[in-house]
Amino acid sequence: MLDINKMVAQESAESATRGHLVELEPWTEEQAIDMARQDGLELTDDHLGIIRYLRDCYADHGGAVNARMLTNSLEEEFAGLGGHRYLYQLFPMGPIAQASRYAGLPMPPGTLDPSFGSTH
């Protein structure tokens, strides 16, 4: 018998990791640059600074940080460069979803929540 709850949970888990690396260790900046290039985005030092920041946050807190907390942290860290606007100029598909993908990180909980405001 089909359990719709299990099916939805499985689809959610698959979509949350689709395109994201599952292991953190084999990641390199060259991988991020190649992945972004395939998506039509050239990563600059500014992009890589955000990616490094996300990796540091993940190393410090693991998966305990949700998307909203991470966005607030990013906006505060990069406020001097333009905050929210700056982040979306660099990562137009959403600084959390897109930058996490290039950083080789799983998407933080809540990233794909429509009320969160990231672009999908």
Image (tube, rainbow, N blue to C red):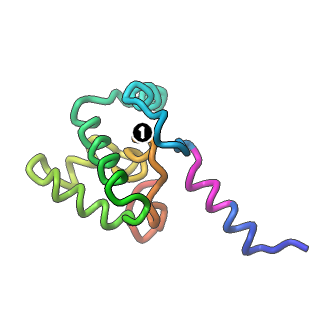
Q: Indicate yes or no whether the magenta region holds residue 13.
A: yes
* Occupied quadrant, residue 102: top left
Left-right relation of 62 to 50: right
Q: Main secondary structure of the magenta part?
A: helix
Name the quadrant of the N terminus: bottom right
**Range of residues picked out in magenta:** 11-18
Specify the farthest residue to the right: 1
**Foreground of the two, 31 or 71:** 31
- Tell me the residue at 40%/58% (across/down): 62
Q: Indicate yes or no whether the magenta region holds residue 98.
A: no
- Tell me the residue at 40%/24% (across/down): 30
Mark 1 Cα-neighbour bin, 10 Å: few <14, some 14–19, many ≥20: many
Specify the farthest residue to the left: 80
Measured from the top left, where is residue 91 in percent x and y?
33, 43
- Tell me the residue at 32%/49% (across/down): 54
Measured from the top left, where is residue 39 in percent x and y?
47, 32
- Tell me the residue at 53%/42% (across/down): 21
In the depicted structure, whether residue 5 falls above or below residue 79: below
The secondary structure type at the circle numbered 1 is helix
Measured from the top left, where is residue 107 in percent x and y?
47, 55
In the depicted structure, whether residue 29 falls above or below residue 16: above
**Foreground of the two, 52 or 102:** 52
Name the residue carrying label 1.
102
Residue type highlighted by circle 1:
Tyr
Left-right relation of 87 to 62: left
In the depicted structure, whether residue 120 falls above or below residue 19: below
In the depicted structure, whether residue 43 falls above or below residue 79: above
Measured from the top left, where is residue 95 in percent x and y?
34, 50
**Foreground of the two, 112 or 69:** 69
